[in-house]
Image (cartoon, rainbow, N blue to C red):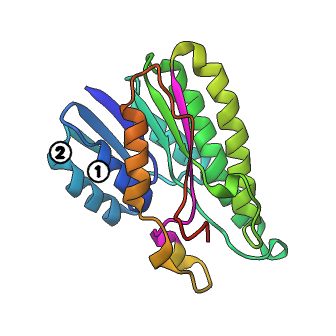
Amino acid sequence: MKRYLITGASRGIGRAIAQKLAARNVTLLLHGRDTVALAQTRKMVEPLCGKVIPLIHDLALASGVRDLIAQVGNQPLHLLVNNAGVAIVKPFAEITEVEWEQTMGVNVTAPFLLTQHFAPKMPPGASIVNILSIAAKTGYANWSAYCMSKFALEGFSQSVREELRDRKIRVLNIYPAATSTEIWESVAGDWPREKMMSPDEVASAIAYALSRPNEIAFENITLSSLSGHL
């Protein structure tokens, strides 16, 4: 039985990934903070896979990451998807220290700690998927904290990839442009959701990349709508 850990699986891209990867020979370890939403994801995928284990933890806190690691246990993972993320969108002068620390905690420190803990036990052929963003390559006004975190995760991911290459562990970095998820409901402004990609389209690209033979790696995948990055 393969074991897949997906963070931020309550909704959006994380939920779509869980749906795409559910299979009879897979145990899905699904992380989220929203108990109700994560239960909905579980209900969707449970008939399709071997087992589902919900993990309710706050990754903004180091203690939350430690508790998640403890609950996952010592059996090796075959896939780690670092998907959980937060976005604080406001002028940089208005960002509070708490908001900054939360952004760094969820978007950078949690992927670092999870990768550091689980990668050494992963078998050859395993994969790590990092959901980055086009904001890992380009800065946007009022998105400074988010862009900072994604730029940081980008550098970490590329370095880890080189360290794990000899062990035949793939590190796949995904750079979606604007994707229509619930995150936009908390971002001020009139955002054209109808022009954005769907989470399912992002998940489909990830599922395809993971389905390739172990010696083939789609290492950097940028996804965008033909209407532009928004």
- Residue located at (51% from left, 22% from top): 169
* Segment colored magenta: 169-183
- Coordinates of residue 93 in the picture (x, y in percent): 85, 74
User: Going by the image, does 147 lie left or right of 13?
Assistant: right
Determine crowd level at label 1: few under 14, some 14-19, many 20+ residues with C-alpha closer than 10 A.
many
Q: How many marks?
A: 2
Nearest the viewer among 5 and 13 is 13
Residue 44 placement, left or right of 230: left
Regarding residue 31, the answer to whether it shows in the image is no
Identify the residue shown where x is 54% and y is 59%: 224
Q: Which of marks 1 and 2 precedes in the sequence?
A: 1
The residue that mark 2 highlights is: 48
Under mark 2, the amino acid is Leu
Reading the image, the residue beneath label 1 is: 19
Placement of 164 over or under 79, stated as above or below? above
- The C terminus: image quadrant: bottom right
Question: Is residue 57 something one can see in this rendering?
Answer: yes
Asked if the residue under mark 1 is in contact with the one under mark 2, i.e. CB atoms within 8 Å, the reply is yes
Residue 5's x, y, as percent? Answer: 40, 39
Find residue 184 and report its horizontal and vertical position in percent: 53, 75
